[in-house]
Amino acid sequence: MTKASQPSSGHHRRQGNNYFVTPEEVTQYGEKGYLILTNVLTEAELQTIEPYFDALVSGSKAAEMKKDFCDMSQPYGTPIEDFKLVNAMLPSKYCPELMNNTFFLIAQNIVNQLYEGSAAMDYEQFLGKKPNKAGAEFSMHQDLGYWPKTDNTWTATFSLALNDATIDNGCLQVVPGSNKENSLRKHSPKKYSNTDGDIEISRDESHTLVIEMKEADEILYLPVTRGSITIHDEKIVHGSGGNTSNEWRKTYVMAFRDAETIDAERAIGFTHSHNDEINWNEIIK
């Protein structure tokens, strides 16, 4: 088990909503596909976000959200009381008060340092792993495997730790450098077990995709403290384990992409909502 070393980042790098990224970090992001920035948001800033996280993850708007409120480790239709890995997609859509929050403003500033073009926020989600749920696993995958293929795939996905992310509660794990592979790995719908054994179901029945790991893959764990951020790109192989601790793991995810790429997605009706009516066989090639 290998854990990433903690960088010398933190509050001292911030001036308001501006956060300085070093040239070495820009290079690492391009070469290895991930970054860790520690202690980015203050305690007061985190407390402005948490009430919305707790409300949506508790299912307060489940009827309105439909498939945007789901369990990312189980099929759609799983009873709320049986959720393990709780997913609330597009939180600012359902809680407009979250728009232009501090996390977004800082992330946009960082993206502008990582990317030479015009990048904008593509989507966001709240992810909560319930305590003592070893099955709250996020299967290893590449984000690009979930999305329509576009000319410019560049993506920076930010994960803000709303509480400490540890190996025990299922922190992010990555395969550094896998983003440099020549081709995307094959993604398949996750298999679920029932009385007839393991069955594979469609994207209309479950959002989750999985890949087969390679023997040479070396997993690096990225534990971070509350208020810290990990950033990963669209091609790095990553996922996270279940939560064997007695506490929730709470994460606010926000992904930025090239503005023209976002326009291309929207033109075919793809908004990252699980309620989108998409012909996956037609747009995922």
Image (cartoon, helix red, strand yellow):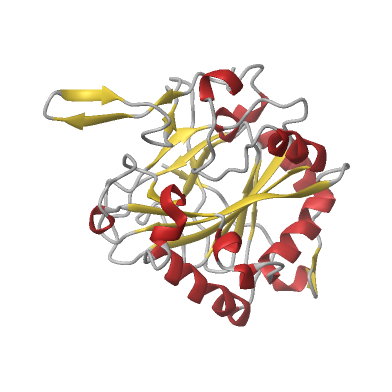
Q: In this view, does 194 lie above or below 73?
A: above
Q: Nearer the viewer, residue 144 or 247?
A: 144
Q: In this view, does 60 lie above or below 126?
A: below
Number of labelled discs? Answer: 0
Q: Position of residue 255 (x, y in %)?
A: 65, 48
Q: Which of 103 and 244 is in front in this view?
A: 103
Q: Where is residue 212 in the image (x, y as percent from the top left)?
A: 42, 22
* Residue 24 seen anywhere in this rendered image of the structure: no
Q: Is residue 284 left or right of residue 199?
A: right
Q: Quadrant of residue 90?
A: bottom right
Q: Which residue appears at 66% of the width and 39% of the height?
A: 233
Q: Position of residue 6 (x, y in %)?
A: 60, 57
Q: Position of residue 143 (x, y in %)?
A: 57, 35
Q: Which residue appears at 77% of the width and 39% of the height?
A: 263
Residue reaching furthest to the left: 195
Q: In this view, does 24 lie to the left or right of 208?
A: right
Residue reaching furthest to the bottom: 44
* Residue 42 seen anywhere in this rendered image of the structure: yes
